[in-house]
């Protein structure tokens, strides 16, 4: 196997703290366990080490990254080192003053997200508080010369409003709108029965999206991401384990992707005790699923293995209880029936009488 | 207006949201943009480096021909800039006398 290239893409999950409580959050369910956040000097040291390794893209997310009052300092150092920085935020807690400071620090890009499923979206759709907040933030973002990129997570409970969401996104002047169906990890997996849309909902939403695309043309580009469960082949997850991406969790744990922490039997190294070069090239965890040597059948002899690399390890673990098997989303997987059954249940018309589990610290503690 | 006149006026500049920089680890110029990166070959890097929004296409060609001791680069540069523009990497500023 040829040696891996550099971790071109670095994601800092600066904190698991968040003012929102999204039912589809991909932060770990046991996030309450990891409340010892890295200090500013540690984040800055990791930036230096990553840049020396060849990292170029820096994502800043969380939780809500604006809750770190050293965000500007981290952005400034990232800019000085030559990172292309992208802030992924709900905009909650953003002021014009703070955005001006982030811009001055060299922030390259902002993605404004809807990270809430119920109240926030309802507020937005009904033109109240959240809509006004997003519009205000959108105006500041544009005033600083950034493209206005809006991301909205789609699921069973809001997918029927997709036309209205697009209309409102156009109204606040978004140039790009990402309608990303929830993928079923972490909190979304916990709430999957309530969140997975039916095939009919999905098809209607894609139809409406296409109508809007025709109407809006170049004015607003819309990306529509289908849930993996409705695909017959798995995604090329993270462009391959340990090939391109590295996530640093709030407590300094280095991960090949932001959900990998759930995988049992892997000890993910911490930047508190290990250098980034050693973590990337030499750690057992980052080498575990590199390349194709780990593959079993049907992946090992599959003619499509170079394309999808066996899919997502976390999805294999969640659906087949074994991170070393083919992603069950794949129709060739011996575990594919699990996905088929979940989709079948999603075609029901009656309401599931089970409360949604909100991503709250109390809920996390209750599940430790 | 003839093509040559236009190239005396067009001033290409790296598009908003994109950043060009030299990456020692990759020994190449790269173009960075939200959630992506293009690794450039040497000639693409040499051309884009000169897209500073002040130099016209004709000036960029002249500079490249001087530096690399060539005299036939106009077509290559124009073709690359057309492709770069189509991909959204560069914007072409028409200068003060803008076209209607």
Image (cartoon, coloured by chain):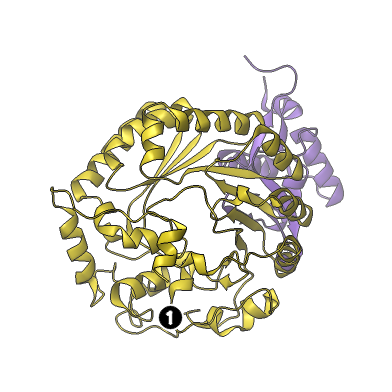
Chain colours: A yellow, B purple
Q: Which is nearer the eye, A194 or A59? A: A194
Q: Is residue A213 visible?
A: no
Q: Which is nearer the eye, A206 or A70? A: A70
- The residue sitting at 77% across, 34% down in the picture is B58
The image shows residue A360 at horizontal and vertical percentages of 44, 56
The image shows residue A204 at horizontal and vertical percentages of 23, 40
User: Is B96 drawn above or below residue A105 in the view shown?
Assistant: above
Element marked by disc 1: loop
Q: In this figure, which residue is indicated by the disc labeled 1?
A: A264
User: Is A349 drawn above or below residue B53 in the view shown?
Assistant: below
Q: Is residue B11 visible?
A: yes
- The residue sitting at 29% across, 76% down in the picture is A320
- The residue sitting at 32% across, 32% down in the picture is A163
Quadrant where the image shows the N terminus of chain A: bottom right
Residue B38 appears in which quarter of the rendering? bottom right
Residue A51 appears in which quarter of the rendering? bottom right
Give the crowd class for mark 1: few <14, some 14-19, many >=20 residues within 10 Å: few
Q: Is A15 on the left or on the right of B54, as rendered? A: left
Chain letter for mark 1: A
The image shows residue A201 at horizontal and vertical percentages of 22, 44
């Amino acid at each position: 196997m040829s040696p891996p290239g550099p971790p071109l893409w670095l994601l800092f999950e600066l904190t698991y703290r968040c003012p929102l409580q999204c039912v589809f959050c991909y932060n770990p369910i046991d996030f309450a366990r990891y409340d010892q956040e890295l200090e500013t000097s540690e984040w800055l040291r990791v930036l230096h080490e990553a840049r020396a390794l060849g990292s170029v893209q820096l994502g800043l997310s969380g939780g809500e990254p604006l809750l770190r009052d050293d965000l500007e300092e981290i952005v400034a150092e990232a800019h000085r080192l030559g990172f292309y920085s992208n802030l992924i935020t709900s905009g909650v807690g953003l002021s014009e003053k703070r955005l001006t400071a982030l811009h001055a620090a060299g922030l390259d890009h902002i993605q404004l997200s809807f990270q809430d499923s119920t109240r926030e979206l309802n507020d937005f759709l009904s033109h109240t508080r959240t809509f006004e907040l997003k519009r205000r933030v959108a105006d500041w973002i544009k005033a600083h010369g950034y493209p206005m990129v809006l991301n909205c997570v789609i699921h069973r409970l809001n997918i029927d409003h997709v036309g209205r969401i697009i209309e409102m996104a156009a109204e606040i002047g978004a140039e790009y709108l990402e309608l990303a169906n929830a993928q079923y990890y972490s909190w979304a997996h916990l709430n999957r029965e309530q969140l997975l849309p039916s095939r009919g909902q999905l098809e209607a939403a894609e139809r409406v999206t296409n109508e809007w695309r025709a109407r809006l043309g170049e004015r607003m580009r819309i990306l529509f991401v289908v849930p993996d469960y409705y695909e017959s082949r798995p995604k090329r997850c993270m462009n391959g384990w340990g090939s391109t991406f590295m996530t640093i969790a709030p407590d300094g744990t280095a991960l090949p992707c932001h959900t990998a922490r759930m995988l049992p039997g892997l000890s993910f190294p911490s930047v508190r005790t290990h250098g980034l070069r050693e973590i990337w090239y030499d750690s057992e965890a980052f080498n575990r699923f590199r390349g194709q040597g780990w593959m079993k059948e049907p992946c090992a002899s599959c003619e499509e293995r170079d394309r999808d690399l066996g899919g997502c390890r976390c999805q294999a673990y969640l659906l087949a209880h074994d991170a070393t098997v083919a992603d069950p989303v794949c129709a060739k997987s011996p575990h594919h029936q699990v996905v088929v059954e979940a989709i079948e249940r999603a075609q029901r018309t009656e309401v599931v009488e089970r409360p949604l589990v909100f991503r709250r610290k109390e809920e996390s503690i209750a599940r430790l | 207006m003839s093509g040559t006149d236009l190239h005396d006026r067009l001033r290409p500049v790296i598009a908003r949201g994109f950043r060009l920089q030299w990456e020692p680890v990759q020994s190449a110029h790269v173009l960075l943009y939200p959630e992506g990166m293009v690794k450039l070959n040497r000639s693409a890097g040499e051309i884009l480096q000169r897209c500073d929004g002040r130099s016209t296409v004709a000036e960029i060609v002249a500079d490249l021909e001087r530096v690399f001791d060539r005299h036939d680069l106009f077509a290559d540069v124009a073709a690359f800039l057309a492709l770069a523009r189509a991909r959204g990497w560069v914007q072409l500023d028409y200068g003060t006398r803008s076209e209607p």
